[in-house]
C-alpha cells in the first residue's frame, strides 16, 4: 500500500529528530500532496492509522474516529477518552452536520463551587485534580458519529488504538520533555499514583498503556457502554470518591452527544462552515471574517502594520461579544443570527480608526474568557469527497492530571472553561460572565473551531487548531493566508501568527512575526505588546483541495504533526 507520510515513526524518526533539534531547519513551504485521501493530525502514528482506514474503504468519519482513538494513546496530553470535542462534517452530497460532544458539568456541581465562604475564588480547584473534571463526552461522540455516518465496523476502528496501547510506541523528544515536566503534578493529584508514567523520559523510550489498552478493548467490544457503564464507569466513580470529585454513575449514564446545526457564513466567494455554541469558535470566526472583508489586506500585506492593526481591532470587538453573549445554547439564548450577520459586524467596525487603536474599555465593558493551549485538531478528506474537522480536548495539558486508576486514561479539567465567578480571572488571568456560569448538566464555553470551507459549492479547505482563545485567531489567519495572500496550505500553516483578544489589551506576536520597525509603528498607533514573544501560537492541521482535485496537507511544524495520504 502506498501510504505517503511525512515524518513517520519509526522510519523517519531520524529526520524528526533533526527537524526538532535544528531551529535553522525551515519547514517545507508545500505540504504533502495526495491524489485521493488525507489525514492531518498531531501525531504521525495517528495520521498513518487514519490514512490506512481510508485505504481499507473507510470514510472520513471512520478515519476521524480511528485517528482520535489513536491520539488518546500516542498523544495523551490532549488526545483523549476522558475529555470532549466537536466534529464538523461535510458529506460528499454537500449536506452539513456537526456533533457536540463537549463535557458537561456534573449534576452535583453548582455556580459557586470554586468559591470559599467569603466569595473568594479557591485557586487551583477548577484547574487540576478531581473537582476540575466535567463528565467526559469523547467516547459517546465518537460512537455516535460512527453509528450515524461510519462505514467500516466499529471494531476495526478501535483495534489500532488497542494494539498501540498494549504493544507500546516510542515517545518523541517533545513528549519526553512534556512527560518529564509532568512528574510532580502526577504525584500531587493522583490518589493512586500511575507508576508507569513516573520516570525520567528520553526520546525513543516506549510507553505501554496496559490499563488503557484494556479500556479500549471494552470500548471495542461494548461500544460507548464500555466507557459509560461497567468497569470503566466503576473506575471513574471510584476515582471521584477517593479524590472528592463529583462525577457519578448517573452522570455517566445520562451523557448524550448532540447533533447541532453548524454555523455558516461567507467570506467573499467562499462559504465557511464551523461549530456553533457551546463553542464560540464558529461565530467568532465568521464575525472576524466579516469584519475585515471589505479592507484591501492583500494590498497591505501579510503581518504588515495596517493588516495587524485591522485584525487586532476586529478581534477586540469580537472577543468582547464572545464574553457577553456566548454560552451553552441549552441554557442561554445565544443571538447567533445577529452575531454572524454582515450588517451587525459592519456596524461593530464603524468605530474602527485606521490610524489608532481603540482602547478596549471604550469598546464595551465585560469579560473575555481564555482557555488552555492543550487541545488537538485533525482534518480528514476521503476518497468519496467527504470532509471532517474534529477538535478535541482535555483542556489543560494532560487535563486534570488525574489518571483513572484501573482504566488508565487522563480526565479533563474542563470545568475551568466555565466562568467560575463573574468578573474574576480564571487560570489564564481573564474573566467570564453570566452566560457561562456553572450550572448542573451545562456545557462549558469553548473556543474550538473545527472548520470547513467551500468555493462554488465544492470542498475547498478543512482546518482547525488547539490553542484556547488563540484557536479562533489562528484559524482566521490561516484562512486569510490562503485566500488573500495566496499561500500554499503548508505555507499558510507555517506562517507566523499574532494573537489579541480584547482583554487583556495586549498584542501577542510569535517570535519573528513582526520586524522591530513594524512593532514600533503599531506601538505608535496605540497598541501594546506582551513583554515576551510567544513560542508558538496554535498548531493548525489543515487540508486544501487544489484546483486539479488533489489534496495538499498543512501539518503544523510547531508540533510533531503529520500529514498522511494516498
Ligand atoms: N478547552 C479549550 C476549549 O474548549 O476551547
Image: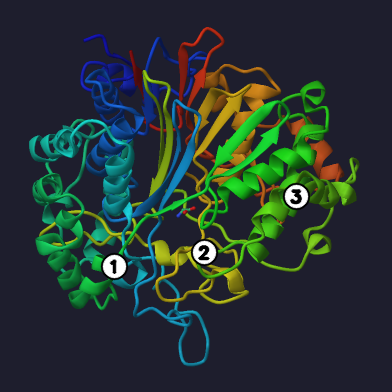
Quadrant location of the N terminus in the rendered image: top left
The residue that appears at 83% across and 37% down in the rendered structure is 521
Choose mark 3 or mark 2, whichever is in front: 2
Q: Would residue 433 be found to the left or right of residue 17 on screen?
A: right
Q: Which residue is mark 1?
A: 254
- Mark 2: few/some/many CA within 10 Å (<14, 14-19, 20+): many
The residue that appears at 79% across and 64% down in the rendered structure is 361
The residue that appears at 57% across and 69% down in the rendered structure is 332
- Which comes before the other along the chain, label 3 or label 2? 2
Choose mark 1 or mark 2, whichever is in front: 1
Closer to the camera in the image, 520 or 287: 287
Q: Would residue 40 be found to the left or right of residue 511 on screen?
A: left
Label 1 – label 2 distance at C-alpha: 17 Å
Q: Which residue is mark 3?
A: 528
- Which comes before the other along the chain, label 1 or label 2? 1
- Which comes before the other along the chain, label 3 or label 1? 1
Residue 328 numbered tag: 2
Does any portion of residue 561 appear in the rendered image?
no
* Mark 1 CB near ligand 1 (8 Å cut): no
Circles 3 and 1 in contact, beta carbons < 8 Å: no
Label 3 – label 1 distance at C-alpha: 47 Å
Expressed as whole percent of the image width and height from the top left, the position of residue 235 reads: 14, 65
Choose mark 3 or mark 1, whichever is in front: 1
**Above or below 484: residue 291:** below
Count of number-bearing discs: 3
Expressed as whole percent of the image width and height from the top left, the position of residue 138 reads: 31, 51
- Mark 1: few/some/many CA within 10 Å (<14, 14-19, 20+): few
Secondary structure category for the residue under label 2: loop
Q: Would residue 539 be found to the left or right of residue 488 on screen?
A: left
Secondary structure category for the residue under label 1: helix
Task: Give the image quarter of residue 7.
Answer: top left
Amino acid at each position: 500500500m502506498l501510504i505517503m507520510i511525512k515524518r513517520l515513526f519509526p522510519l523517519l524518526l531520524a529526520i524528526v529528530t533533526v527537524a526538532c533539534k535544528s531551529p535553522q531547519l525551515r519547514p517545507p513551504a508545500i505540504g504533502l500532496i495526495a491524489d485521493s485521501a488525507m489525514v492531518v493530525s498531531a501525531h504521525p502514528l495517528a495520521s498513518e492509522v487514519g490514512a490506512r482506514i481510508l485505504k481499507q474503504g473507510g470514510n472520513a468519519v471512520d478515519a476521524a474516529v480511528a485517528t482520535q482513538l489513536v491520539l488518546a494513546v500516542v498523544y495523551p496530553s490532549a488526545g483523549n477518552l476522558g475529555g470532549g470535542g466537536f466534529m464538523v462534517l461535510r458529506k460528499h452530497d454537500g449536506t452539513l452536520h456537526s456533533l457536540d460532544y463537549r463535557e458537561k458539568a456534573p449534576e452535583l456541581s453548582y455556580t459557586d463551587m470554586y468559591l470559599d465562604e467569603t466569595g473568594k475564588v479557591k485557586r487551583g480547584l477548577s484547574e487540576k485534580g478531581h473537582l476540575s473534571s466535567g463528565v467526559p463526552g469523547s467516547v459517546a461522540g465518537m460512537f455516535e458519529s460512527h453509528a450515524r455516518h461510519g462505514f467500516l465496523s466499529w471494531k476495526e476502528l478501535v483495534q489500532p488504538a488497542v494494539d498501540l496501547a498494549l504493544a507500546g510506541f516510542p515517545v518523541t523528544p517533545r513528549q519526553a520533555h512534556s512527560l518529564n515536566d509532568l512528574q510532580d503534578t502526577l504525584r500531587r493529584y493522583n490518589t493512586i499514583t500511575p507508576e508507569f508514567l513516573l520516570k525520567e523520559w528520553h526520546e525513543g523510550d516506549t510507553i505501554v498503556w496496559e490499563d488503557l489498552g484494556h479500556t479500549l478493548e471494552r470500548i471495542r467490544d461494548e461500544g460507548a457502554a464500555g466507557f459509560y457503564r461497567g468497569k470503566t464507569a466503576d473506575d471513574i466513580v471510584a476515582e471521584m470518591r477517593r479524590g472528592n470529585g463529583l462525577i457519578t454513575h448517573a452522570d455517566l449514564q445520562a451523557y448524550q452527544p448532540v447533533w447541532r446545526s453548524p454555523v455558516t457564513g461567507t467570506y467573499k466567494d467562499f462559504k465557511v462552515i464551523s461549530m456553533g455554541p457551546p463553542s464560540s469558535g464558529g461565530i467568532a470566526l465568521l464575525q472576524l471574517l466579516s469584519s475585515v472583508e471589505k479592507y484591501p489586506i492583500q494590498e497591505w500585506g501579510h503581518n504588515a502594520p495596517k493588516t495587524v492593526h485591522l485584525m487586532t481591532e476586529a478581534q477586540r470587538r469580537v472577543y468582547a461579544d464572545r464574553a457577553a453573549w456566548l454560552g451553552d445554547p441549552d441554557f442561554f439564548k445565544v443571538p447567533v443570527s445577529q452575531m454572524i450577520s454582515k450588517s451587525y459586524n459592519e456596524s461593530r467596525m464603524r468605530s474602527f480608526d485606521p490610524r489608532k487603536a481603540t482602547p478596549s474599555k471604550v469598546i464595551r465593558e465585560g469579560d473575555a474568557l481564555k482557555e488552555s493551549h492543550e487541545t488537538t485538531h485533525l482534518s480528514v478528506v476521503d476518497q468519496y469527497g467527504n470532509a471532517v474537522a474534529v477538535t478535541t480536548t482535555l483542556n489543560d495539558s494532560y487535563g486534570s492530571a488525574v489518571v483513572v486508576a484501573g482504566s488508565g486514561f487522563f480526565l479533563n479539567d474542563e470545568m475551568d472553561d466555565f466562568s467560575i465567578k463573574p468578573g474574576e480571572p480564571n487560570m489564564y488571568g481573564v474573566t467570564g460572565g453570566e452566560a457561562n456560569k456553572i450550572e448542573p448538566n451545562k456545557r462549558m464555553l469553548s473556543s474550538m473551531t473545527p472548520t470547513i470551507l467551500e468555493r462554488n459549492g465544492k470542498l475547498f479547505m478543512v482546518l482547525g487548531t488547539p490553542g484556547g482563545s488563540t484557536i479562533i485567531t489562528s484559524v482566521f489567519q490561516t484562512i486569510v493566508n490562503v485566500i488573500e495572500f495566496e499561500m500554499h496550505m503548508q505555507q499558510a500553516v507555517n506562517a507566523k501568527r499574532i494573537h489579541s483578544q480584547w482583554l487583556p489589551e495586549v498584542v501577542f506576536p510569535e517570535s519573528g512575526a513582526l520586524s522591530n520597525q513594524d512593532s514600533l509603528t503599531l506601538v505608535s498607533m496605540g497598541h501594546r505588546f506582551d513583554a515576551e514573544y510567544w513560542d508558538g501560537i496554535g498548531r493548525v492541521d489543515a487540508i486544501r483541495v487544489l484546483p486539479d482535485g488533489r489534496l495538499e496537507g498543512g501539518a503544523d511544524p510547531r508540533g510533531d504533526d503529520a500529514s498522511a495520504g494516498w
